[in-house]
Image: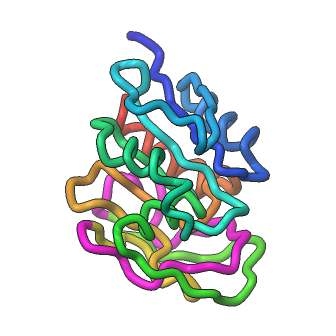
Amino acid sequence: MATSRVLVVNNGTLSLKQLRRRFEELGSETDTVDAASVPTSVGSRYQAIVLSGTKVRAYDGEFYKPLIDLVRSADVPVLGICGGMQIIAVAHGGRLKEGEQRVGGHEAHVDPQDPLFSYVKPTVTVFHRHTLYLQEAPEGFRTIGRSEHAPVEFLRSDDGRVYGAQAHLEFRRDGAEILRGFADLYR
């Protein structure tokens, strides 16, 4: 069986090394590009796309246009993490709101029927490091996880191809298990 390859789009995350390592632990090779250098398509080279978190606001639609075009046109599973999820959501009409600064482990409740959560219990502890929160899933998406401060902790597109996580899944055991659920979608 051929090794799967994941395109990791680095949106300025502080934890790129940890994110790549998680996918490599799951048996996937990773290549990294920054948001300004994304290819126009992934063809058959990649089996999944992962958008990292960002230190830049997700509202810059012009800057992220090539990335959003890639997400919309790709026929592989996509996972946006923290700012990566926010970029996807804002591009689809989602609204972000400033909230309490959250750093560390926080509980979230997830939809146990969704394949993303195949390896975790309905209540998970995930790592937060942010102040912006998506208020509701945009049209074409649905909320599949919530926490006290994040009304949309996790989201999924109606076609089941695009996922988003407010939390940084590269940290903590539950985050690693959720990434394993995502890897099952492309292997």
Q: Residue at x 48, y 58 (%)?
A: 120
Above or below, 111 against 16 in this view is: below
Q: Quadrant of residue 129?
A: bottom right
Nearer to the camera, 124 or 82: 82
Within the image, what quadrant is residue 97 found in? Answer: bottom right
The image shows residue 103, relative to residue 115, as above or below, that is below
Residue 22, position in %: x, y? 64, 38
Name which residue lies at 65% across and 50% down: 11
Query: Residue 71's spot in the image, x, y percent?
Result: 38, 46
Q: Magenta span has 134? A: yes
Q: Position of residue 20 (x, y in %)?
A: 66, 36
Please name the residue shown 28% across and 36% down the image: 75
Most extreme residue toward the front, as rendered?
A: 62
Q: How many marks?
A: 0
Question: Residue visible at 41% across and 32% down?
Answer: 40
Which region shows up in magenta?
113-140
Indicate the quadrant containing the N terminus: top left, top right, bottom left or bottom right: top left
Q: Nearer the viewer, residue 74 or 185?
A: 74
